[in-house]
Image: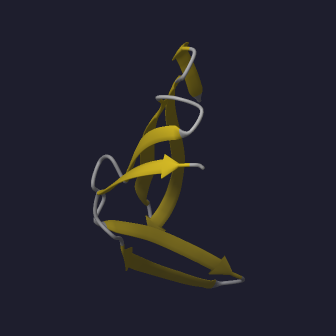
Amino acid sequence: MHVFPLKDFDLGLSWDYNLLEVGHGRYRHNSFVDASVRYAASKRLEFSLRLTNVFNRKTYEEASFSGLDYNYYSLPLRGREAMLSVSVSF
């Protein structure tokens, strides 16, 4: 979702959600949220801030089913990250 409250200002929010069975009768909710802000100060200067993994999830659990075989695994995730950028065009 992107919202443009002002002419040169942009707010963004993305959400990815899934529900998986990660064990017999055990379920895991995976929810990931990213946010961003962008401001164009002029035609040549732009500032942006992006925040990933807002809820600071540490693991992602997954399951795969093939015939009668069930495989469950957990993957480590990178923590919350922020990136500030300044763009200048000449």
Q: Is residue 31 visible?
A: no
Colour pattern of the rendering: secondary structure
User: In this rendering, is residue 23 above or below 82?
Assistant: below
Question: Residue, x 60% and y 49% (percent of image)?
Answer: 90
On the rendered image, what quadrant is the N terminus found in? top right
Give the quarter of the image for residue 3. Answer: top right
Q: Residue furthest right?
A: 67
Q: Nearer the viewer, residue 12 or 88?
A: 88
User: In this rendering, is residue 14 above or below 52?
Assistant: above
Residue 5 drawn at (x, y percent): 51, 13
Question: Residue, x 52% and y 58% (percent of image)?
Answer: 20
Residue 55 drawn at (x, y percent): 29, 47
Residue 15 drawn at (x, y percent): 51, 41
Q: Is residue 80 visible?
A: yes
User: In this rendering, is residue 32 above or below 41?
Assistant: below
Question: Residue, x 44% and y 45% (percent of image)?
Answer: 34
Q: State left or right for residue 42 relative to residue 53.
A: right
Q: State left or right for residue 73 relative to residue 44.
A: left
Give the quarter of the image for residue 43. Answer: top right
Question: Residue, x 43% and y 56% (percent of image)?
Answer: 27
Q: Nearer the viewer, residue 30 or 11?
A: 11
